[in-house]
Amino acid sequence: MRISTIIEWPKIKRYVSLGFSGLIIGIGIWICSILMGSPEHLWNLLDVHYEMRRIYPVPLLSVMGQNPFMDKIICLLNYSILRKCILGMFVPGLLNLAMPAIIFRYMLLGALIPIIILDAPFILLLMLPPLILDVLGLSMAAAAGEGIGRAWLLPRRTYGDVGRIEALKIGAANSLPLMLKAILIFVLSSILEALLGYVTPPFLS
C-alpha cells in the first residue's frame, strides 16, 4: 500500500500546502521586522502570545534534558493530542475554521524558527522530523474536523439530497478514521520528540 493512500493525501494536501504557506509568511514577517529595525517587537509579541495561551511553540524545546522518559511522554501527549490536535485544529474544523487556524499556527512558528536558529542553529535538524509529522497530523485533524463540520452545517451542498443527521453520519464515517490516524501520528511524534530531547544538550553545549 502506498504512503499517499495511508495518509489519505488527496484529503489533506490542501491543508499541508496551507501549513507550509503559513511558515513562509511567518519567516517573511520576521524578515520584515529585521528590515524595519525592530525585531524585538516581534519577539515580545510572540512571547506574549505563547505565555497567554500557555502553549509550547516548539514542544521539543520543552523536554530537553535528562528528565524521566514517561514525564516527557505525558507532557508531549497532553499538549500534542489534546491541546494541539483536538482543541487546536479538530474543533476549529467543526466550525469550518481549520484553514485560518492552520495558517495562523504555522505563521507564528515561521516567525519563531529564525529566532531559534540564531540562538541554536543545530536545533533545526532535530526539529525537522517532528515538524513533518506535525504538519501531517494537523492536516489530518483539520480535514477530519471540516469533513464533519461541512456535513452538519452544509449537508445538502456536501452530500446532496440527504438530511442533516444522515449527512452527519456519512461525514463522521469518512472523517473519524482520518482523526484516528492523526492521533496515531502525534503519539509517534511525541515518542520521537521525547527521545530527541535526550540528544539535544550535546548539540547546544
Image (tube, rainbow, N blue to C red):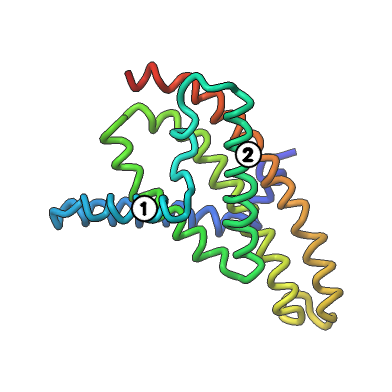
x and y, in percent, of residue 112 in the image = 34, 46
When the figure is inspected, residue 92 is found, relative to residue 126, above or below; the finding is below
Say left or right for 142 vs 35: right
Residue under circle 1?
Answer: 24
> How many discs mark residues in the rendered view?
2
Q: Amino acid type of disc 1?
A: Ile
Q: Nearer the viewer, residue 101 or 8?
A: 101
Q: Amino acid type of disc 2?
A: Leu
The quadrant of the picture occupied by the N terminus is: top right
> On the image, which quarter does residue 150 sit in?
bottom right
Q: Secondary structure at mark 2?
A: helix
Q: Nearer the viewer, residue 125 or 2?
A: 125
Residue under circle 2?
Answer: 77
When the figure is inspected, residue 178 is found, relative to residue 71, above or below; the finding is below
- Distance from disc 1 to disc 2, alpha carbons, whole Å, reads 27 Å
Q: Nearer the viewer, residue 53 or 109?
A: 53
The quadrant of the picture occupied by the C terminus is: top left
- Characterize the local packing of mark 2: few (<14), some (14-19) or many (20 or more) Cα atoms within 10 angstroms: some
Q: Residue at x 49, y 38 (%)?
A: 59
Q: Residue at x 31, y 35 (%)?
A: 117
Q: Residue at x 71, y 52 (%)?
A: 179
Instruction: From the image, state whether disc 1 or disc 2 is nearer to you.
Output: 2
x and y, in percent, of residue 15 in the image = 55, 57
